[in-house]
Image: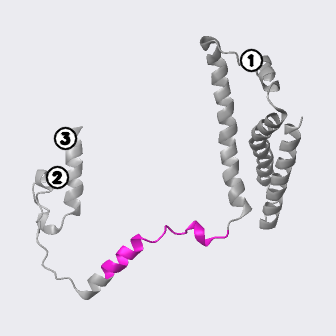
Amino acid sequence: MLAQRIAQQSLRRLAAQPNAYRFAAPVAVAMGIAGQKRLVAAASVSENHARDEILAKQRLNRPVAPHLSIYKPQITWYLSALNRITGCTVSGLFYAYGALYLVAPALGWHVESAVLAASFAAWPAFLQVLTKFTLAMPFTFHCFNGLRHLVWDTASMITNDKVQQTGWFVVGLTTVASLALAFI
């Protein structure tokens, strides 16, 4: 295997070498010792070269194009990011609770529904509503925005105006549904 690879590399390098090195030993070509090495540069730095170096240094400080700061922020950006964040949040909370539910008996913890409901009922009403709203918001947003994406899969409401309208509709519906779930 190694001999085959060395032969393949040497043949590739031999094919890329100028005519003067065509008849060099394949091992010399493979090791890269068949060519000349010039360690000293003989060219002087000109004024144009110095100007080019200054421009190159300025280019390094430029932002990566296209930079987000030149664009007007739109609702579609925020909803796209929020859809991903809420998806990760909701699934992460489900996985965390599932893992906790599996490990809890070994640790002697009680995370059954009845215990959680009883301890939650002991909280102040304001804290209950705030907690339910905080938990309902990502779930309802991800559900409604997922329905919006399913509508887009049917190739309808894809114009810029409709995308913005449905975006604001999802935001409003999410707020109303989250408040309704929080006050239940």
Q: Amino acid at mark 3?
A: Ala
Residue at image coords 88%, 38%:
183
Q: Which residues are magenta?
A: 52-72
Mark before the other along the chain sequence, 1 or 3: 3
Question: Quick one: 87 or 69, which is closer to the camera?
Answer: 69
Tell me, yes or no, whether the highlighted magenta stretch contains residue 9. Answer: no
- Structural crowding at the residue carrying mark 3, measured as other residues with C-alpha within 10 Å and reported as few (<14), some (14–19) or many (≥20): few
Question: Quick one: 51 or 114, which is closer to the camera?
Answer: 114
Is residue 156 among what the camera can see?
Answer: no
146 with respect to 12 (left or right): right
Q: Position of residue 2 (x, y in %)?
A: 21, 39
| Residue at the disc numbered 2 | 30
| Residue at the disc numbered 1 | 112
Up-down relation of residue 94 to residue 85 (above or below): above
Up-down relation of residue 43 to residue 133 (above or below): below
Residue at image coords 77%, 18%:
115
Disc 1 on helix, strand or loop?
A: loop
| Residue at the disc numbered 3 | 3
Q: Position of residue 180 (x, y in %)?
A: 89, 41
Disc 3 on helix, strand or loop?
A: helix
- Structural crowding at the residue carrying mark 2, measured as other residues with C-alpha within 10 Å and reported as few (<14), some (14–19) or many (≥20): some
Disc 2 on helix, strand or loop?
A: helix
Q: Amino acid at mark 1?
A: Glu
180 with respect to 28 (left or right): right
- Structural crowding at the residue carrying mark 1, measured as other residues with C-alpha within 10 Å and reported as few (<14), some (14–19) or many (≥20): few
Q: Amino acid at mark 2?
A: Ala
Mark before the other along the chain sequence, 3 or 2: 3
